[in-house]
Image (spheres, rainbow, N blue to C red):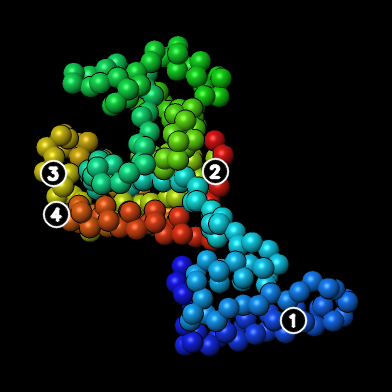
Amino acid sequence: MRLLHKSDSSVIRFLDSVALWQNLIQSMSGSSRPVVSIPDVDKANKVELYRALESSLGSPFSSQPFVPNASPLIIVISGPSGVGKDAVIKRLREVRTNIHFVVTATSRGMRPGEIDGKDYFFVSKERFLSMIERGELLEYALVYGDYKGIPKQQIRDYMAQGCDIVLRVDIQGAETLRKILGNSVVFVFLVAESESALVQRLIDRKTETKESLLVRIATAREEVKHVKRFDYVVVNAEGELENSVKLVESIIDAEKAKVQQRRVII
């Protein structure tokens, strides 16, 4: 808190108007309460001036924040295969505190090198069906004969700790979450700089047969058409990972600065 100076003319005029207002009220009500004398702003002790201002206004100054702390967000990141969703999320978790990436539950078997609870929560098909029946999953799908789903309790636990939640889903999963959660979550569409650049990335991965590569490219063409259904689009250009992550961070910061906060109930 700074001391007032003579140059603060608007503040001084306000204090004068407060004194006039007090005199008017007292004369109308017949109150015997004495008018508080506000000391000279350029000579007064700061504490003395502060207390005098409180007394003049008739109530103590509140130390409560003008704006409450922002609520935790759920950020859904989606986009076609090959745009770098995993790389963006991995880097985002490294540079951003209080971010939790939701670990998906799956009924498929664990592959070599995978870690239960880190890559997926591996459960039996019977256990997964039980989770569906008990309403424990926010969203789930049957993918190539195996179930994948998002556990609700994991989201609740981390949001209760003040963490923002990041979900990585495909376009179909994003549409399902939109139906369930509406505008209470932030939908971010991640895309390559062009179709040509995306095809080059898919070729460079060398993880597809020519048949599956053709399917992924055709699917990506259709998925890009859904961009207008999202709140934000982030172009993850080749070699520009840091810029993409900074843009996602800016989106989170902008959402937290909104007057009308998103409120999500899981």
User: Disc 2 marks which amino acid?
Assistant: Val
Q: Circle 2 is placed at which residue position? A: 264
| Residue at the image position 81 percent from the left and 78 percent from the top | 25
Other residues around mark 4 within 10 Å, as few (<14) / some (14–19) / many (≥20): few
Other residues around mark 1 within 10 Å, as few (<14) / some (14–19) / many (≥20): few
Left or right: where 204 falls relative to 86: left
- Of the numbered discs in the image, which one, if any, rests on residue 6? none
| Residue at the image position 55 percent from the left and 69 percent from the top | 48
Which circle, 4 or 2, is nearer the viewer?
Answer: 2
Q: Secondary structure at mark 4?
A: loop
Hey, which quadrant is residue 172 in on the image? top left
x, y (%) of residue 16?
A: 65, 85
x, y (%) of residue 11?
A: 56, 82
Give the mark nearer the N terminus: 4 vs 1. 1
Which circle, 1 or 3, is nearer the viewer?
Answer: 1
| Residue at the image position 60 percent from the left and 62 percent from the top | 61
| Residue at the image position 11 percent from the left and 43 percent from the top | 204
Query: In the displayed structure, would residue 78 be above or below residue 208?
Result: below
User: Disc 4 marks which amino acid?
Assistant: Gly
Query: In the displayed structure, would residue 259 be above or below residue 8?
Result: above
Q: Circle 1 is placed at which residue position? A: 21
Task: Work out whether residue 48 or residue 136 is closer to the camera in this orientation and state it.
Answer: 48
User: Disc 1 marks which amino acid?
Assistant: Trp
x, y (%) of residue 185?
A: 48, 47
Which circle, 2 or 1, is nearer the viewer?
Answer: 1
Q: Circle 3 is placed at which residue position? A: 203
Q: CA distance from mark 1 to mark 3?
A: 77 Å
Q: CA distance from mark 4 to mark 1?
A: 64 Å
Other residues around mark 2 within 10 Å, as few (<14) / some (14–19) / many (≥20): some
Residue 228 in view, yes or no: no
Q: Circle 4 is placed at which residue position? A: 239
How many marks on residues? Answer: 4
